[in-house]
Amino acid sequence: MRNIYIIFTLFAVLLLGNSTKLFAQSGQELVDICGMVAGDATYLKDFQIKLEAAKPGEEPPRAAHSLVLSKNTKYRFSICNSKDFPGEAVLQLYDNNRLLGTNYIVATGKSYPTFDFKCTQTGVYHIFISFKEGQQGMAVALLSFVERF
């Protein structure tokens, strides 16, 4: 009888010990969260980014992606950060060398989870994603269709 109590106690300790482990967010979980943040927009594409911290004196790392956007279309860009990393993502949309949109306003220091872009010319656009102050981070950027205008 005593052996049964010992076995039961060991089993309970193993079971409870394993249930307290924390699991990191996966890229797919961030995509799902970002889909909810995008609201009623239609998912088109996601960009999963994981960057290491910048070394002292170096330029902060950034991810770059190119995409084709269509004229007379309103798009929504959403960005969601992993809670497992300290970095807060900054998404910037460029046409050649001109900044067209971002989720971070430098003048106010405020970040937004989404921003909309009304495309007036079909062409190749570039998005750059980095983390504030060159911190290590993981994030998902989502491109969604809002409407034709």
Image (cartoon, helix red, strand yellow):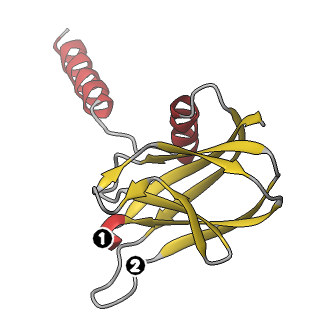
Q: For mark 1, give the secondary structure.
A: helix
Identified at 73% across, 52% down, the residue is 119
As drawn, the label of residue 60 is: 2
- The three-letter amino acid code for the residue at tag 1 is Glu
Looking at the image, residue 104 lies above or below residue 39: below
Q: Are marks 1 and 2 in contact (CB under 8 Å)?
A: yes
- The three-letter amino acid code for the residue at tag 2 is Pro
Q: Which residue is mark 1?
A: 133
* Camera-nearest residue between 128 and 83: 128
Identified at 45% across, 57% down, the residue is 138
Identified at 34% across, 55% down, the residue is 85
Point out the tag, 1 or 2, that comes first from the N-terminus: 2
Looking at the image, residue 92 lies above or below residue 37: below
| Distance (Cα) linking label 1 and label 2 | 7 Å
Question: How many residues crowd mark 1 within 10 Å: few (<14), some (14–19), many (20+)?
Answer: few
Residue 101 quadrant: bottom right
Percent across and percent down for residue 41 are: 66, 31
Residue located farthest toward the left when viewing the structure as drawn: 2
Horizontally, residue 143 falls left or right of residue 10, namely: right
Horizontally, residue 128 falls left or right of residue 14, namely: right
* Camera-nearest residue between 31 and 148: 148
Percent across and percent down for residue 147 are: 74, 33
